Amino acid sequence: MIDTELYEAKILYPFQEKTINLILEELSSNDKDFNLLFQLPTGGGKTVIFSEIAKRYIAKTGKKVLILTHRIELSVQTSKQLTAIAVNNKVINSEVKDIPNQDEYNCFIAMVETLNNRLNDDKNFIQNVGLVIVDEAHYNSFRKIFQFYDNANILGVTATPLSSNKALPLNDNYNKLLVGESISSLIESGYLADAESYTYDVNLHGLKIGSNGDFTVSSSDVVYGNYFMQEKLLFAYEEVAIGTKTLIFNSGIETSIRVEETFKKRGYKIRHLDSTFSDKDRKDVLAWFKKTDDAILTSVGILTTGFDEPTVMAIILNRATRSLTLYHQMIGRGSRKLPKKDQFKLIDLGNNVRRFGVWQDYINWQDAFKFPDRFLEARLSEVEDIEFEAKFEFPRGSDDVFDLEKLNSFNIKEIYYDCIDSGKKGKDAVEMSLNNHFEVIKDAAEDFFHGLELMGVLGPHIEHRLKHYTKCITKSTPNYYKYLIETYLRQLRQKLRANLDDE
C-alpha cells in the first residue's frame, strides 16, 4: 500500500542537489551513447534524485525521459513522485497497448517486460526519448531494452552496483560509475538511522547452493523451519526487539508461515506476507502493519524493494544469503529516519554480518564495478567455512541423467585430510575427484561429444568442489584456482576422449 502523503514535492537535501548537478554534467559532457551508473544507499532518496534529473533534463533538452522499473509498485511510486514535481507522466502497464496522445507526456514509466513486448511489435512505440533511467539497475532484465535506445543516454541507479548475474557484469553496459554518499556519511549527516547489530551464531549445515549462487529456498526451509531455529528466532526477538515494529525476512514461504504460527502462540501481533498474495490482500496486510503498534511482519521475497515504512524499528534476517545486494536491501528497510528514530536494531540469524561485514562498513564500489569477480570472491572467501557448510544443489532433472549419489558421496575436504593423514600428497584428492567426475559422466554419456555436453552441465559442480579443495590448502590464490580449473577440465576431456567413442 503506497501512502500518498509521502509524495508531496520535497525540498532537496544539499547532497541530493549536488548529486543531481554532477549527473547532469556527466550526461551533457559526453556523447549520446554514454551510459552512467549511479550508486546511492537505500534511504538516500534515489527516486527523488532521478525524478528531479528527469524534470531538468526535459526542460533543458526538450527530449523525453523513459524510466524502467521491474515491479508495478515502483512504477506507481515513481509516477507519484514525478506528479508531485509537475512532470507530466504516464505509466505503461499491461493494459496500455498504444499511446496515441504521447505528445501530452514528457516522461514514461514502464515495467521492463511490458515495454519489451511493445517495442518488439513497434520499435517506435515511444518516440523522442533522449534519456533512459533504470531503477534497481543491478537486475539484468533491463538489458533487453537497451538495444532499442542505442542513441539515447542510459542512467542506471542502484544501491549495490553488482549485477544479479555475475556472468553479465554491469560494466558491459555502463561506461562509468558515479558513487554517491556512503551509508556512514548519511548516518553522520542525519539522513539515515543507524543500525545496532546483534548476531547469533547458527549452524548452516544442510544449506545447498543453487545455480544462481545463493542458498536454495528448499534447503533454507529445512534449516530454518525446524523447531530449534524457530526457538532461536523467538529468543532473539524477545531479547532484542520485543515491543517494537519488526520486519522478519525469510527465504521460503513454509518457514515464514511457521514463524507466524510460532509467534501467534506467544500472543504476539504478527502477519505473514509473500508474493502469492493478491493485490488486495497485500494492501490489507501492509495497512495493518502500518497502523498497528508493535506489529511484526514476516515475509518472503516481496518487501526488499518498493516498500517504505519508516516506523520499522527492527529488522530480523531469519535467513542466510550470499547476495550482498539482498543483504543491503533487507537492512535498508529499517534505515528510514524519523524525528524520534535515530537508530534501529538488526538481528542476524544467518551469519550474514560475518559474511559481508557490518552494514555501515565502507565498500569500494568502484572496485566492485570494475572487477566484480575479484570483489565478490574476496568478500565471500573471508569466511573460510561457509561453503563447507553448504551442499551443492544440482539443477532439476540431474538425477535422471547422473548418479548423484556417487557425486554427493565424494567429500573432497575429507578425502584431502585422509590423504594428508596417510602420508599421501594432498593433490591426490584432486586426482581422485577427477576420476569420480569421469566415471559419472562416462556412465551417462552415449559418446565423446555427449560426454562433453554432460561435462559442461557439471561445470558448476566441478568449480564448487575445487573451491572446497583450495580452502584446504595454504597459499591458494585466484590465479591458482583458475589454473586448477583449467588443468582439471583439460585432463577430464582427455580422459573422456580416450575412453568414449567419437560418434
Image (cartoon, rainbow, N blue to C red):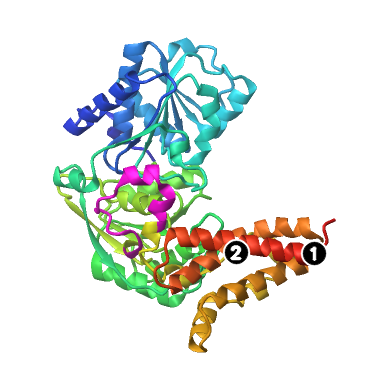
- Above or below, comparing residue 190 to residue 86 in the picture: below
Residue neighbourhood size for the residue with mark 1, other residues' Cα within 10 Å, grouped as few (<14), some (14–19), many (≥20): some
Residue 118, percent across and down?
Answer: 59, 24
Q: Is residue 364 left or right of residue 403?
A: left
Residue 236, percent across and down?
Answer: 30, 70
What stretch of residues is rendered in magenta? 354-377
Q: Is residue 187 left or right of residue 418?
A: left
Q: Is residue 252 visible?
A: no
Q: Nearer the viewer, residue 125 or 460?
A: 460
Tag on residue 488?
Answer: 2
Query: Magenta segment, principal secondary structure?
Result: helix
Residue 484, percent across and down?
Answer: 53, 63
Q: Nearer the viewer, residue 495 or 175?
A: 495
- Please say whether residue 286 is one of the residues in the magenta stretch: no
Residue 261, percent across and down?
Answer: 44, 67
Residue neighbourhood size for the residue with mark 2, other residues' Cα within 10 Å, grouped as few (<14), some (14–19), many (≥20): some
- Above or below, comparing residue 337 to residue 135 in the picture: below
Name the kind of residue labelled 2 in the image: Tyr
The N terminus lies in which quarter of the figure? top left
Residue at image mark 1: 500
- Please say whether residue 366 is one of the residues in the magenta stretch: yes
| Residue drawn at point x = 52 percent, y = 38 percent | 141
Name the kind of residue labelled 1 in the image: Leu
